[in-house]
Amino acid sequence: MRSLISIADLTNDEIEEIFALADSAGKLRADKVGNGQIMATLFYEPSTRTRLSFESAMQRLGGSVISCSDMKASSTAKGETVADTAKVVSSYADVLVVRHNWDGAVQAMAEHAEVPIINAGDGGHEHPTQTLCDLYTLRQEKGGLKGLTVVVCGDLKNGRTIHSLVYALARFGANVVTLAANGMELPQYVIERLEREYDYGFAPVASGDLNSVVTETDALYLTPKQPHQLALYTQVDKVIQSQLNTMATGLRYDAFYMTRKQKERMRDGGANISYPTIGPEFLQEKRFQDTVVMHPLPRVDELSPELDKDRRGIYFKQAAYGVPVRMALLQFLFRSNRAPQRAAQKAGRTYRSPEPIGPKCHNANCITVKEPVSTERRFRIYFADHIGALILGCDYCDHRFKVDYVGNVKSKRYSSYDSVLGDTIRAWWDKGELALFDSIKEAEELSYEPTKSSAQRILMTEEEIARALAEMSQQILTDCRDPDRLLILGVRSVGAQLAQRIANEIEARRKRRPELGEIEIYGAGDELRRVGTSDPELGPPSLKDREVVLVDDVIYTGRTVKSALSIIFRSGRPQSVRLAVLVDRGHREVPVKPNYVGKNIPSSEQERVRVRLRGEERETTEQVVIYSIINPSVSAQIVVNSKPEKAANH
Ligand code: CP
């Protein structure tokens, strides 16, 4: 028997096999296929449906159930780790069904248990058995999954049911339209996995008919397998936008999948955040006469009770399918002695730090952070050449983050990561010599020394930087249709500092400060943040109808800007997005043209341009410098510049 941690642990054929078993749940019950099996349910978080339907399923199969009525009354309260609990309970049962509030906790338990584990929901990460119920319901209602269009709505960021569901819908060839509450968009790591493993792309579309029936939300994005991502970096291209809108208007919506606000995963309980609702208007719209409404439940107030009486409100049926589907899953696992086959291989290879200090997952709710003793520090490495970055993906929670510092365990040298070093880094990794660090401090604590220096040239002095920022700020104000709707959005981290300077300049001219935000392309927290407010209840800045100026320090290939634009368009519909960069290196792989440029500095691939600002680690003067990467061979020490660097390379 094998474990089920992610929906990716089952192939499409296996899911179909489970559905065929669910179709004959009556026979499974009559045959008592679970006779003699014991299932233990360990729920560290509340549940009605998942727990009771699993327990009912096991009993109907002729098996029996042991349970901890309240995990707070278990030895967890005395400090027992999930690893020890999993090991111990394994000797009392043949299968464990676990729900935990930490992302990746069930994976960690599976690594210590002696029997298979089924993930009944881990933090905001995945809920694969709910997805089996959702797919089964859709299949029963619509006859199949391929080609369906499903609108997922509400808290797409924290909703674990959504994450498992969109991966599965993509695999079965359905279209997914996302209609997120403000600040609760699908996380970037989910989007990337959809793109990388399932070849799905997102494009922003606006569709009035959805906005008219789902109140309090506005952004809509569609996920066809077509190359509409172009719209992500063609600044409000009216022709493409209009084509997309027409396409959205022509869509037949097969299902609305609504979710509740996951208050328990929000810092302040999400008290003041507005949230979409589906009300009686939905029932009156002719376009939705065949659109079913689903919800994993429990609901709070996002679905009007009027829907309960309508044939399209199928969420109670969806909950009822929990028993036959889980009976089928248990039978499938009982008789499965095949080695597990992942539906989609996790991309990248595994990295384990050869040093006692090394990168940590940036997701504060990850089991590796909450209870490191039950886990190993294990990541996937992705050479994200499209944005010139080295990315680590946590093997437990799937969150991704950028690695800033690389070192060689033999030479005990470190430097900031540069994509030109990609082959060297791969060679170190193959030989087990690659050490990665979150900070210079970590590297130096292990007695690593910075790499040697090469010649560098100053391209902009402090005065020139200040002058360029002043001129760009003036031009931004001149171009702005309504300065009160201006949002200055800096790409973290140097771009965000420059955005702050531009906001200061604009404030000095207008005597009013424009709203300021920052955007993080690879972080584990919010991708969009307000800057200059200590009130967390305000959430991310609103993008709707704003004149956004995106600020970055250096533009070269344009890929970083493309990623930033993807986040912007996924998070709302601004009136316009203009781009301000201090340095334009003059080479582009994606069609992005900055509107405001401090200085054009044509430079080759081997050259690196770095903007050094005061406030960055150890910088005392401000300047833009250029230097070369010289022969980054395996044997040579990496030769970059004299100072340890913090800023990302461009
Ligand atoms: N859908 C779902 O997981 O419900 P419970 O939280 O009641 O198990």
Image: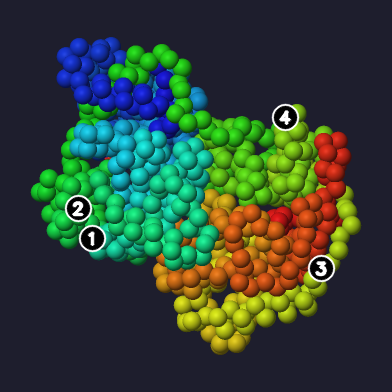
Question: According to the image, label 4 marks what residue?
Answer: 430
Which marked residue is nearer to the observer: mark 3 or mark 2? Answer: 2
Query: Depth-wise, is mark 1 or mark 2 nearer the camera?
Result: 2
Q: What residue is rendered at 61% in x and 72% in y?
A: 595
Q: Which residue is mark 3?
A: 459
In the current view of this chain or complex, which residue is farthest to the left? 309
Q: Tell me which label, 1 or 3, sits earlier in the chain.
A: 1
Q: Which residue is mark 1?
A: 213
For residue 467, say whether it is visible. yes
In which quadrant of this rendering is ligand 1 seen? top left
Label located before the other in sequence (1 or 2) = 1
Image coords of residue 15 (percent x, y): 34, 27
Task: Give how far across and how far down residue 565 sits, in percent.
Answer: 53, 60
- How many numbered discs? 4
Tell which circle, 3 or 2, labels the residue nearer the N-terminal end. Answer: 2
Question: At numbered mark 3, what does the secondary structure look like: helix, strand or loop?
Answer: strand
